[in-house]
């Protein structure tokens, strides 16, 4: 069974890296062949010659792989079936349905999932909507959206689409897992109206209860900085926690505690199970003798599983909470049916249950971290607990029968403390290779931070938060205030830990073979006492932790154009230097291309510093992420057309204006600013676009021109002053391919072989304009777009090599 379930997990994971789904006919043929193989094995086993154990194990593994692959493929076909027609993208559509989840209110409006009941056109049954305030349609007020309400709305929809960059969150895969097959926003319309205040269903009732609890907490803690943490602990909604707080939590390695985590679910279920066990064992202090009717252990297992289910429902039935629930359910079922044979069986069964219900779980770090943590704990602790022993009393007859003496409270406390410390030690070391593989960094202060945070959050803050959210308002306020005060004290301690210079160790995310080597060493390190030279396991970490970021050879250059939506951001790398040109847009007051795309990419590559940054001009789609980059990555200097009073200029260690004629050379690569003219800064009438820093890069005789948002007038100025310097092999299309740029004369002077359009999917400016694209094609210029190709990487050497992220890492859901 364990081999079959392991194979099921492998098959499921293999399906999730496929570029194209296999047809249902192919799956049927594979299933038929598998049945024939199993039939042959069964016949052989019943014959005179018994099938060897190894063969049976391999057969079970292969069977699990095929079944897992087929099951995941069938579910993927079902999930992808409902889709929005291409012709219906961007059209006004009137829909009727119910609010399907806990809405998220933010400064610009509200976001929520919507279960569609009927629509003017064919629409997927579940969509994600945003209702913006003062945006797109100049909405002055957004209504109070609550779960379970039925609304009639006029919306504009599009197919699921997210930014596609290496080492970044896959938004399209997340939408697929959530069952959301279209996204959009609410339009201003007279017939937008609430039809029913509440539509009864089990899911609506749960979401409404979560909304009530969230509002009770927010009312009890108005304006408190960590009210979002209390909400996350009670209802699992983490969206109210500030990004700055998340950075501290992640740097100290306690991010797993700031939610309804597996630890909290297990703790709450265990407390209720213990209470049920004690009450049932004592027959509720009556003479009913209930244990004779049903063992107290089975009652405790049933109560614990039921409480875990209620708590997970309260958390919105999120995927991480589901994993813990299924594991507890498996343990409870094994105990109830007297099948609790080994912990490895329980772990593998829970693994199978999770993947049967949610085959996309293998795409997320939480899946691997949670199961790996449990596996490490089992490997490092099961069978190694040292019993409490005592020396025999003085004068005791050695021949007398041994009577065990119950341990004292002090002895039990010391044993529990020792087991807890050993468990934390095992988890901390055991997850280092996996953490480096997933994130490219590991928290050095995590053991200390968790030693403080785990008992405080799990044993004190979470119970207080749960109790306070259920009490009447007059009692809830002091209880929740106490919980918030404790979180505030913890946050101050964590900020001290986070500020340490070496709080986090960063290195490039390793290749899979290096991860396997480090994992082998970790298993050796955590082997039982007596295993030879266990400390040598640490040696396998050296190439993992001491790796350096990759870089081009001298005289060569790599340019990465990020997919940041409607905006521009490019990373230029030489053999010894790195330059960031523009930083993408701001998506919201808390989110931008800097903290969502660029900084995660740099950290995953192990890049901790930039030699320089160019912010071409002040438009938000070019400068929106600059402050986040400056905060997250040490940057030598900033070159821009911004005023010295601009926030970015003030945050830079050194700020200079870009001006035509500036030149420098890094590692055999030439950098040259072609625009704007130095005298243009004296004019206050020029638009920001007109002063876009225009940069030309040349490596090995090949060049690329980064034109920012210059328009026809600036193109004419370049033709007048620097026509001889304009020719380039690659052109970053000026102003994203707008109709006010890319004139024939300019394109004929540059003569590029390839043009890149850095644009957002279905952006409201309709960039690039079709007439501009036609102009490029008429001149024989190949075109690539980030909204279609994702991040684009150009490697400059003797020739130019182009790679596109969506093409090179194609997945069936993209």
Image: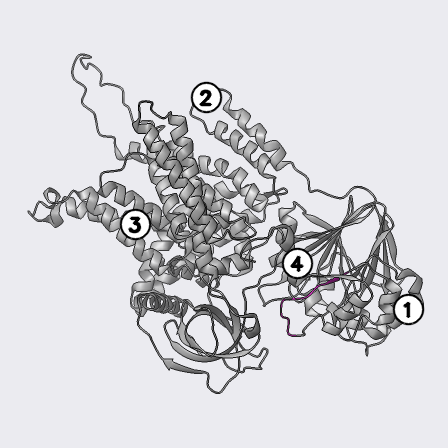
N-term-proximal mark, 2 vs 3 = 3
Classify 776 as above or below 330.
below
Mark linked to residue 719: 1
Q: Is residue 213 visible?
A: yes
The spot of residue 94 in percent (x, y) is: 47, 80
- Horizontal placement of 39 versus 613: left or right? left
Who's the residue at 76% across and 67% down the image? 617
- According to the image, label 4 marks what residue? 789
Along the horizontal axis of the image, is 446 left or right of 571?
Answer: left
> In the image, is 805 to the left or to the right of 1?
right
Q: How far apart are the alpha carbons under marks 2 and 3?
A: 37 Å
Residue lying farthest bottom? 190
Mark 4 and mark 1 lie on one chain; the one further toward the N terminus is 1
Residue topped by disc 3: 269
Alpha-carbon span between mark 1 and mark 3: 73 Å
Mark sitting earlier along the chain (4/3): 3
**Residue where numbered disc 2 is placed:** 531
Q: CA distance from mark 4 to mark 2?
A: 51 Å
How crowded is the residue under tag 3: few (<14 C-alpha within 10 Å), some, or many (20+)?
Answer: many
The mark closer to the camera, 4 or 2, is: 4
For residue 748, which quarter of the picture?
bottom right
Magenta span main SS:
loop
User: What is the spatial separation of the Cα atoms under label 2 and label 1, in whole angstroms?
Assistant: 74 Å
Provide the secondary structure element on which disc 4 rests.
Answer: helix
How far apart are the two marked residues, 4 and 3, measured between alpha carbons? Answer: 47 Å
Magenta range is 755-764
């Amino acid at each position: 069974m364990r081999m079959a379930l392991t194979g099921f997990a492998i098959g499921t994971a293999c399906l999730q890296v496929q570029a194209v789904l296999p047809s249902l006919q192919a799956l049927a043929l594979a299933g038929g062949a598998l049945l024939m193989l199993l039939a042959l094995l069964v016949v052989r086993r019943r014959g005179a010659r018994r099938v060897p154990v190894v063969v049976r194990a391999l057969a079970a593994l292969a069977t699990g792989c095929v079944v897992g692959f087929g099951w995941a493929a069938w579910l993927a076909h079902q999930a992808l079936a409902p889709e929005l027609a291409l012709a219906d993208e961007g059209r006004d559509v009137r829909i009727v349905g119910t609010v399907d989840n806990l809405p998220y209110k933010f400064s610009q409006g509200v976001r929520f999932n919507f279960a569609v009941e009927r629509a003017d056109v064919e629409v997927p049954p579940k969509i994600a909507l945003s209702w913006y305030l003062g945006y797109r349609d100049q909405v002055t007020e957004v209504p109070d959206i609550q779960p379970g309400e039925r609304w009639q709305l006029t919306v504009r929809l599009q197919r699921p689409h997210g930014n596609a960059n290496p080492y970044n969150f896959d938004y399209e895969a997340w939408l697929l897992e959530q069952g959301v097959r279209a996204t959009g926003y609410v339009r201003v319309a007279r017939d937008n109206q609430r039809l029913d205040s509440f539509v009864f269903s089990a899911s609506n009732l749960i979401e409404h209860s979560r909304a009530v609890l969230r509002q009770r907490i927010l009312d009890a803690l108005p304006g408190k900085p960590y009210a979002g943490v209390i909400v996350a602990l009670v209802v699992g909604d983490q969206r109210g926690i500030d990004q700055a707080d998340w950075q501290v939590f992640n740097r100290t390695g306690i991010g797993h505690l700031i939610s309804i985590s597996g630890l909290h679910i297990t703790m709450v279920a265990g407390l209720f199970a213990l209470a049920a066990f004690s009450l049932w064992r004592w027959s509720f202090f009556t003479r009913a003798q209930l244990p004779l009717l049903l063992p107290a252990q089975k009652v405790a297992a049933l109560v614990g599983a039921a409480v875990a289910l209620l708590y997970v429902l309260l958390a919105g039935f999120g995927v991480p909470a589901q994993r813990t629930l299924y594991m507890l359910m498996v343990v409870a079922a094994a105990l109830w049916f007297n099948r609790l044979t080994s912990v490895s069986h329980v772990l593998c069964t829970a693994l199978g249950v999770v993947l049967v219900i949610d085959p996309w779980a293998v795409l997320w770090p939480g899946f691997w971290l949670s199961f790996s943590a449990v596996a490490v704990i089992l490997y490092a602790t099961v069978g190694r607990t040292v019993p409490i022993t005592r020396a025999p009393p003085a004068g005791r007859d050695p021949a007398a029968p041994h009577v065990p003496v119950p341990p004292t409270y002090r002895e039990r406390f010391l044993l529990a403390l020792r087991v807890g410390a050993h468990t934390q030690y095992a988890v901390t070391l055991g997850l280092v290779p996996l953490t480096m593989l997933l994130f490219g960094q590991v928290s050095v202060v995590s053991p200390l931070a968790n030693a403080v945070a785990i008992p405080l959050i799990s044993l004190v803050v979470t119970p207080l938060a749960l109790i306070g959210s259920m009490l009447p308002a007059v009692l809830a306020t002091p209880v929740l205030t106490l919980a918030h005060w404790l979180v505030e004290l913890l946050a101050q301690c964590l900020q001290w830990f986070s500020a340490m210079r070496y709080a986090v160790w960063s290195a490039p995310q390793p290749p899979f073979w290096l991860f396997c080597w480090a994992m082998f060493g970790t298993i050796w390190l955590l082997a039982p006492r007596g295993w030879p030279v266990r400390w040598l396991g640490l040696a396998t970490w050296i190439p993992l932790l001491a790796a350096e970021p990759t870089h081009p050879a001298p005289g060569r250059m790599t340019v990465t154009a990020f997919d940041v939506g409607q905006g521009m951001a490019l990373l230029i790398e030489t053999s010894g230097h790195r330059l960031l040109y523009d930083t993408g847009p701001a998506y919201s007051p808390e989110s931008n291309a800097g903290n969502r795309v660029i900084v995660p990419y740099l950290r995953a590559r192990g890049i901790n510093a930039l030699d320089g940054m160019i912010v071409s001009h002040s438009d938000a789609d070019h400068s929106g992420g600059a402050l986040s980059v400056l905060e997250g990555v040490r940057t030598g200097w900033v070159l821009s057309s911004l005023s010295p009073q601009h926030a970015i200029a003030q945050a830079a260690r050194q700020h200079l204006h870009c001006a035509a004629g500036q030149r420098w050379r890094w590692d055999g690569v030439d950098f040259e600013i072609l625009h704007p003219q130095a005298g243009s800064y004296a004019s206050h009438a020029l638009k920001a676009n007109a002063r876009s820093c225009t940069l030309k890069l040349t490596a090995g005789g090949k060049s690329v021109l980064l034109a920012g948002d210059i328009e026809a007038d600036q193109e004419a100025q370049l033709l007048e002053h620097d026509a001889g310097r304009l020719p380039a092999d690659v052109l970053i299309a000026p102003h994203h391919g707008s109709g006010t740029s890319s004139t024939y004369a300019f394109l004929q002077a540059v003569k590029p072989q390839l043009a890149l359009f850095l644009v957002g999917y279905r952006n409201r400016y309709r960039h690039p304009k079709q007439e501009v694209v036609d102009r490029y094609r008429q001149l024989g210029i190949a075109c690539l777009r980030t909204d279609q190709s994702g991040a684009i990487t150009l490697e400059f050497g003797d020739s130019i090599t182009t790679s596109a992220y969506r093409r090179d890492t194609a997945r069936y859901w993209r």
